[in-house]
Amino acid sequence: MNPHGRERLLLSAPAPIANVLVDVVVERARQQQLFDAGKLPFRVCDRATTNSTRLAVAAEEFGEIAHAINEGTVTVQERAHLREEVIQLAAVCVAWAEALNPKQEGPRA
């Protein structure tokens, strides 16, 4: 699909999907801010980061989702926390996909 078709597809996404995608983009930006502030030792999107390290980061995020589920997802607050963890995992996976993008030149923000 050409870039303009991809943009149209994204812009025409139903609101629930668009809202989730925006939240993932916001989380990716937050992860970048943490790296820029020296609070993260590396970026998942950096080509120098190994796939083993990326897997460990994704597994840690997945573990937080499992923990949230085991704690219960009954209340609105618990469901919001679970959603937050899922968004964080999705953002890590997006960063990983960025690193694997063959068209990418060097590390991305």
Image (cartoon, rainbow, N blue to C red):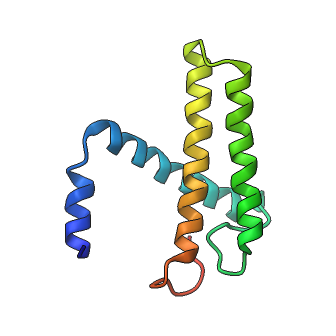
Nearer to the camera, 61 or 38: 61
Quadrant, the N terminus: bottom left
Above or below, 94 against 16 in this view is below
Please state which of residues 77 and 37 is positioned toward the viewer in this rendering: 77
Relative horizontal placement of residue 27, taking residue 69 as reference (left or right): left
Q: Is residue 37 visible?
A: no
What residue sits 59% from the left and 12% below the top?
75
Residue 58 visible? The answer is yes
Q: Who is closer to the viewer here, 34 or 80?
A: 80
Give residue 93's quadrant in the image: bottom right
Q: Residue placed at 55% from the left, 50% from the top?
A: 90
User: Residue at coordinates 19% horizontally, 60% vertically from top-left?
Assistant: 8
Residue 32 lies in what quarter of the image?
Answer: bottom right
Residue 109 position, x and y percent, is 56, 70
* Image: 100 above or below 15: below
State the count of labels. Answer: 0
Q: Is residue 35 above or below residue 81?
A: below
Residue at the image position 59 percent from the left and 66 percent from the top: 96
Give above or below for 80 relative to 59: above
Residue 48 in the image: state x and y as whole percent: 71, 81
The spot of residue 20 in percent (x, y) is: 42, 42
Using residue 65 as the reference point, say whether residue 29 is left or right of it: left
Q: How far across and how far down the image is residue 34, in percent?
A: 69, 56
In the image: residue 96, left or right of residue 34: left
**63 to the left or right of 78:** right
- Residue 82 lies in quadrant: top right
